[in-house]
Image (tube, grey):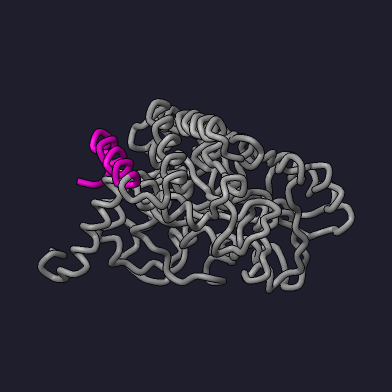
């Protein structure tokens, strides 16, 4: 038992359990996994090494590993309508590395959303492998609407002729039209790649458009709105299957994490239920309530609202930085992350905004009434960020609410 083997680590885990149980996770990329997913992650599958693919392994003793991985693949195909699925990527960034390396040569030109406008590091930022290995052009958001201007994206694509166009984001609160991106890519004979890591659960729940069947390659994490383990997947058209598989193994990875792949299979089964669709729908309802309430308190929201699970708050009119707001909200048990906003004039470590979302709170069963309380507490905590007594009062209110909504998977 861990308690007897390593008391220090055991105590750290127990403290984190308490933090998660008595606070509300509002970072939109975070969620709570079920006890079943957690059990699969902590199973004896961790003991096995399985380089290769089902029925084509380099080590013996794979009959049950093959059965598990084939089941995970089937569940993903059925859920998304994907022609080919690789469940082995270790996470979202490796999945993007592997997808890009499967389709391109170093020095080829790619096009993705600018990080400061809501894109991801792996979509072409200079500090990432994607920005170092490839020539990059990046589209941003319209300065007036803070939304994607598809006409401008098309214009840039026609001028720059990238070999691959990436759609998807990590801090974009509006619906992404994956089909428009795919059409633009097709027009210039480029590959289309959709990174759906943030909205994958919403796609399953049919509250966000899907990139299938028209997108060439789709990458995703398996946590976030999917509520699975930390991991990734690549889904693609059959014509790219061999390139994708070779890029994952042996191109970028060794043995797959079999215990994590089993947990992915469990999460995919959970996501195939009617209850999951209700959950996805509630995520969006909850996010819209938080957004509306925050705007009623005078907060400026990037794009003036949200269509999905995510809210990006521009704090410049509140005379508070993102870092200051994050610290104040941490003190009351509301976990958000500081985040740059489009056309931000502050540095990344202390930007002008915060990013928050509803997936984890929704997993606990919280609904519109609780979202109104959360929005009010956000406002009060930021307004009273230098008043410890007031912050302590809010902290106790948050804790009392959390007692009525236990975290799934935490006993």
Q: Which residue lies furthest to the left in this view?
A: 4
Give x and y (percent) for residue 123.
Answer: 65, 59
Left or right: 321 with respect to 372? right
The answer to whether residue 238 shows anywhere in this view is no
Give x and y (percent) for residue 246.
Answer: 58, 66
Considering only vertical position in the picture, is 149 above or below 118? above
Q: How many marks?
A: 0
Q: In the depicted view, which residue is nearer to us: 252 or 67?
A: 252
Q: In the depicted view, which residue is nearer to us: 159 or 286?
A: 286
Q: Does the magenta stretch include residue 3?
A: no
Region rendered in magenta: 390-411
Q: Which residue is drawn at 46% across and 62% down?
A: 90
Q: Which residue is drawn at 62% across and 69% down?
A: 128
Q: Which residue is drawn at 74% across and 45% down?
A: 181
Considering only vertical position in the picture, is 150 above or below 192? above
Left or right: 281 with respect to 160? left
Q: Quadrant of residue 42?
A: bottom left
Q: Does the magenta stretch include residue 394?
A: yes
The dominant secondary structure in magenta is helix
The answer to whether residue 338 shows anywhere in this view is yes
Considering only vertical position in the picture, is 242 above or below 196? below
Q: In the depicted view, which residue is nearer to us: 291 or 43?
A: 291
Give x and y (percent) for residue 247.
Answer: 59, 66
Looking at the figure, which quarter contains the N terminus? bottom left
Give x and y (percent) for residue 371.
Answer: 42, 32
Left or right: 402 with respect to 146? left
Q: In the depicted view, which residue is nearer to us: 308 or 103?
A: 308
């Amino acid at each position: 038992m861990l308690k007897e083997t390593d008391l220090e680590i055991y105590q750290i885990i127990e403290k984190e359990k308490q933090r998660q149980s008595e606070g509300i996770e509002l970072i939109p990329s975070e969620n709570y996994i079920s006890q079943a997913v957690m059990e699969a992650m902590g199973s004896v599958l961790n003991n096995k090494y399985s380089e290769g693919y089902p029925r084509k392994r380099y080590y013996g003793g794979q009959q049950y590993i093959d059965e598990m991985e084939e089941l995970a693949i089937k569940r993903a195909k059925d859920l998304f309508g994907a022609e080919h699925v690789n469940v082995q990527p270790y996470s979202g960034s490796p999945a993007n590395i592997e997808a890009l390396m499967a389709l391109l040569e170093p020095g080829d030109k790619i096009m993705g959303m600018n990080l400061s406008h809501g894109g991801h590091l792996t979509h072409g930022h200079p500090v990432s492998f994607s920005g170092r290995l490839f020539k990059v052009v990046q589209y941003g958001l319209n300065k007036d609407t803070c939304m994607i201007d598809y006409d401008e994206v098309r214009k840039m694509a026609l001028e720059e002729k990238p070999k691959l166009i990436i759609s998807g984001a990590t801090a974009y609160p509006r619906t992404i039209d994956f089909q428009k991106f795919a059409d633009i890519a097709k027009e210039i004979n480029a590959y289309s790649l959709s990174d759906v890591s943030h909205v994958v659960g919403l796609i399953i729940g049919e509250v966000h458009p899907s990139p299938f069947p028209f997108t060439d390659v789709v990458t995703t994490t398996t946590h976030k709105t999917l509520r699975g383990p930390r991991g990734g997947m690549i889904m693609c058209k059959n014509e790219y299957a061999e390139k994708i598989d070779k890029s994952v193994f042996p191109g970028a990875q060794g043995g797959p994490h079999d215990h994590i792949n089993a947990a992915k299979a469990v999460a995919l089964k959970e996501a195939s239920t009617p209850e999951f669709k209700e959950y996805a729908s509630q995520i969006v309802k909850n996010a819209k309530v938080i957004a509306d309430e925050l705007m009623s308190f005078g907060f400026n929201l990037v794009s003036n609202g949200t269509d999905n699970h995510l809210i990006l708050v521009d704090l410049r009119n509140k005379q508070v930085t993102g870092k200051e707001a994050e610290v104040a909200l941490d003190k009351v048990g509301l976990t958000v992350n500081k985040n740059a906003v489009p056309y931000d004039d502050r540095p990344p470590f202390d930007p002008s905004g915060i990013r928050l979302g509803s997936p984890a709170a929704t997993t606990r069963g919280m609904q519109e009434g609780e979202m109104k309380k959360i929005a009010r507490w956000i406002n009060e905590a930021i307004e009273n960020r230098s008043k410890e007594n007031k912050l302590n009062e809010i902290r106790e209110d948050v804790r009392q609410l959390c007692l009525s909504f236990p975290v799934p998977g935490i006993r």
